[in-house]
Image: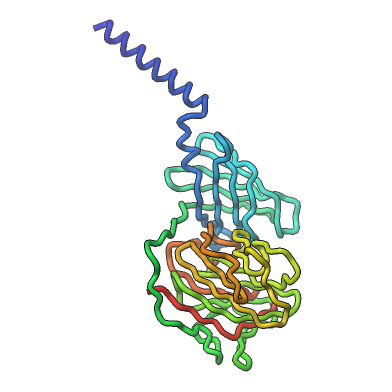
Amino acid sequence: MMKNIAKQGRVTTLMFICAVFISANGFGQSAKEDLVGRWNLTVQMEGKEVPSWLEVKLSGFNTLVGYFVGDEGSARPISVIHFDNGGFSFEIPPQWEQTEQYLKLEGQLKGKEISGTIRHPLGGNHAYTGTPAPSLDREGEPNWGQAIEIFNGRDLSGWHADAEENQWYVKDGVLVNPEAGANLITDEKFMDFKLMAEFRYPEGSNSGIYLRGRYEVQIEDNKGTPPSSVYFGGVYGFLTPNEMVVKSAGEWQTFEITLVGRRVTIVANGKTIICDQAIPGMTGGAIDNKEGEPGPLMLQGDHGPVEFRKITIVPAR
């Protein structure tokens, strides 16, 4: 009997030593691996729920890196994410904020959720929670329905502004945004669709179309510049067009956009500039983080003047 007890004691001691050895040598780090992936964050800011996004990647054996999208701006790289015992943190420099203060995010990984606080560059600590982003994979090709003219050429029926003062109006069959103000959002929501839009803008202007209210396709006066994810035709901060096909300011231009799950194809002014590429996550300024649900179209009106004369959508059935 004593021999069996001694033997069991040696086995227990050996298992403990093996566990310490495995931990010390970087194995068995399931908690760190569980943080790897894409996360949709909901941030509590000034009484509102603001969407945000985080991607965590493993670089080499042990280093965590990533990308982050805040309440505005584009996806920004994270050089290192510190991880210890389920807790993690990182800092990134300001982007459009007029400050030298860094954004700092701290959090805890518990099961399939993360939570913590974000110190904003402009001040204030904001609580957040996060859940894994859905894959949005689709099986087979969609069956397309009938085309819907979501701008009727007469008035703003079927649309609403996201601010009390709405500067959008219709003149001579054209939807006009004369100055920076409210964004314009469709009452109806869509999941997978084809979108056709005709638009123009004055010199130096900046606007965009948010697909499902979450992914901005950039509209901007970028003639003469190389393509970029934050310039004309790019999915803001994520996908870069293969060439710059923008026309001069004041000319009518076109987008033909197909969105199926996360995969998007963009034809701008008759040329395919993004072909069946996956959008990693929400862009800055998204209306929510409910990626698995239908969402509206949103026309960006808070940056600069823009006009639309045709907006047609063909939803998948």
97 shown above or below 308: above
* Residue positioned 44% across, 18% down in the render: 17
x and y, in percent, of residue 309 in the image:
60, 86
Q: What is the quadrant of the N terminus in the image?
A: top left
x and y, in percent, of residue 147 in the image:
45, 82
Would residue 307 be seen by someone viewing this image from the given angle?
A: yes
* Residue positioned 45% across, 36% down in the render: 30
Would residue 303 be seen by someone viewing this image from the given angle?
A: no
x and y, in percent, of residue 41 in the image:
52, 55
Q: Residue furthest left?
A: 1
Q: Residue furthest front?
A: 271
x and y, in percent, of residue 7 in the image:
31, 10
Q: Nearer the viewer, residue 47 or 15?
A: 15
- Where is residue 269, by image quadrant? bottom right
25 shown above or below 170: above
Q: Residue furthest bottom?
A: 172
Q: Exactly how many numbered labels are in the figure?
A: 0
63 shown above or below 222: above
* Residue positioned 45% across, 78% down in the render: 314
* Residue positioned 28% across, 6% down in the render: 3
Colour scheme of the picture: rainbow
Q: What is the quadrant of the C terminus in the image?
A: bottom left
151 shown above or below 274: below
